[in-house]
Image (cartoon, rainbow, N blue to C red):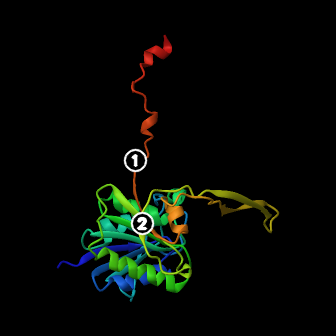
C-alpha cells in the first residue's frame, strides 16, 4: 500500500507541542513533511507575505518528519511553500495543528490554523484543521493519536474538492470523548475588551482581549457539541455567497439610473 504523503503545519510555531506530537504518531503510516512558522502566528487569518523575502530554514532532526522547515511567514505561506516548492511531490493530505485551543464558529475567519487548511484546499489538496480545547500535553497527544487512527480507518472520508474539515477536540480533563459528531458552525461570539495603557514614552496604546460569550448553543453546532464533550467535525468551503439575497432580476440597467 502506498504511504500517505502528509504536509504538516500549524500557527503555534515550529516548537509547538501539538505539532511535534502529531508528527511522531503519523510517521508509522505516512511520510511527514513539516513546514511551520518560526514563531507563533495565531489569529493571522489568511494573511500571506508579499512585501518581504520568505526564508525556509531546514530544521535538523525533527522527530517523525522526513524533513522540516521553519518559515519567517504566516501559516498560509507555509502551505504555499510546502505544496509548491519544498515537498518532493504534491501531498495527499494537509494537516494543520494540533492547535492549542479550539477554533469554533466565527474563529475560522481569524484562525491561522484553519486558514492553513484552507490554503491547502485552494491548492487542490485534501486538508484538515485540528484544534484541542486545552493546553495539556496528555490531551494534545491524545488528539494526535486519534487523528492518526482516524485517517487510516474505514470511517475516514477524504474531504471532497473545495471542502476542508475543521475538527475540534474537547479537553481531556473532561474525560475521553465517546463520539465524533458532524456538525455545523456555531456562533462563538466574543465581547471585545480594550485595555488602555501608557507606554514608557507617554503614548497611549490599547491591548485587545476577548471574552467568549457562548450560552445555550445548539448541540448540533460545533460550539454546543464540543461543550457537550464531543469531538466535532465541520465541513467548510470558500463560497460565502448569501444566495437568498440575490433577486430574481440579477442585472440593473445602468442607463435607468441616469435617465
Would you say 22 lies left or right of 132 here? left
Q: Position of residue 259 (x, y in %)?
A: 49, 10
Residue at horizontal 43%, vertical 84%? Answer: 21
Where is mark 1, residue-wise? 239
Extreme-right residue of the structure? 202
The mark nearer the N terminus, 1 or 2, is: 2
Q: Residues within 10 Å of mark 2 (few under 14, many from 20)?
A: some
Q: Quadrant of residue 156?
A: bottom left
Q: Quadrant of residue 77?
A: bottom left
Answer whether labels 1 and 2 touch (C-beta < 8 Å).
no
* Quadrant for the N terminus in the image: bottom left
Secondary structure of the residue carrying numbered label 1: loop
Q: Position of residue 232 (x, y in %)?
A: 45, 67
Which of the two residues, 237 or 202, is positioned nearer the viewer here?
237
Marker disc for residue 181: 2
Residue at horizontal 38%, vertical 67%? Answer: 128
Q: Residues within 10 Å of mark 1 (few under 14, many from 20)?
A: few
Amino acid at each position: 500500500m502506498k504511504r500517505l504523503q502528509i504536509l504538516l503545519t500549524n500557527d503555534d510555531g515550529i516548537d509547538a507541542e501539538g505539532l511535534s506530537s502529531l508528527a511522531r504518531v503519523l510517521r508509522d503510516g505516512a511520510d511527514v513533511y513539516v513546514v511551520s512558522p518560526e514563531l507563533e502566528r495565531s489569529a493571522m487569518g489568511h494573511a500571506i507575505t508579499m512585501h518581504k523575502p520568505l526564508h525556509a530554514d531546514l530544521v535538523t532532526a525533527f522527530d517523525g518528519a522526513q524533513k522540516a522547515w521553519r518559515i519567517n511567514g504566516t501559516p498560509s505561506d507555509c502551505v504555499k511553500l510546502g505544496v509548491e516548492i519544498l515537498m518532493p511531490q504534491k501531498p495527499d493530505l494537509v494537516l494543520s495543528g494540533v492547535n492549542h485551543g479550539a477554533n469554533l464558529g466565527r474563529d475560522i475567519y481569524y484562525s491561522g490554523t484553519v486558514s492553513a487548511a484552507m490554503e491547502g484546499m485552494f491548492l487542490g489538496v485534501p486538508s484538515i484543521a485540528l484544534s484541542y480545547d486545552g493546553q495539556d500535553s496528555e490531551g494534545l497527544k491524545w488528539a494526535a493519536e486519534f487523528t492518526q487512527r482516524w485517517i487510516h480507518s474505514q470511517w475516514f472520508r477524504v474531504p471532497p474538492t473545495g471542502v476542508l474539515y475543521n475538527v475540534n477536540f474537547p479537553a481531556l480533563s473532561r474525560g475521553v470523548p465517546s463520539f465524533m459528531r458532524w456538525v455545523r458552525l456555531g456562533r462563538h461570539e466574543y465581547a471585545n475588551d480594550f485595555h488602555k495603557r501608557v507606554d514608557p514614552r507617554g503614548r497611549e496604546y490599547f491591548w485587545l482581549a476577548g471574552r467568549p460569550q457562548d450560552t445555550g448553543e445548539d448541540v448540533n453546532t460545533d460550539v454546543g457539541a464540543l461543550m457537550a464533550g464531543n469531538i466535532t467535525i465541520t465541513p467548510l468551503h470558500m463560497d460565502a455567497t448569501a444566495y437568498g439575497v440575490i433577486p430574481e432580476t440579477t442585472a440593473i440597467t445602468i442607463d435607468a439610473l441616469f435617465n
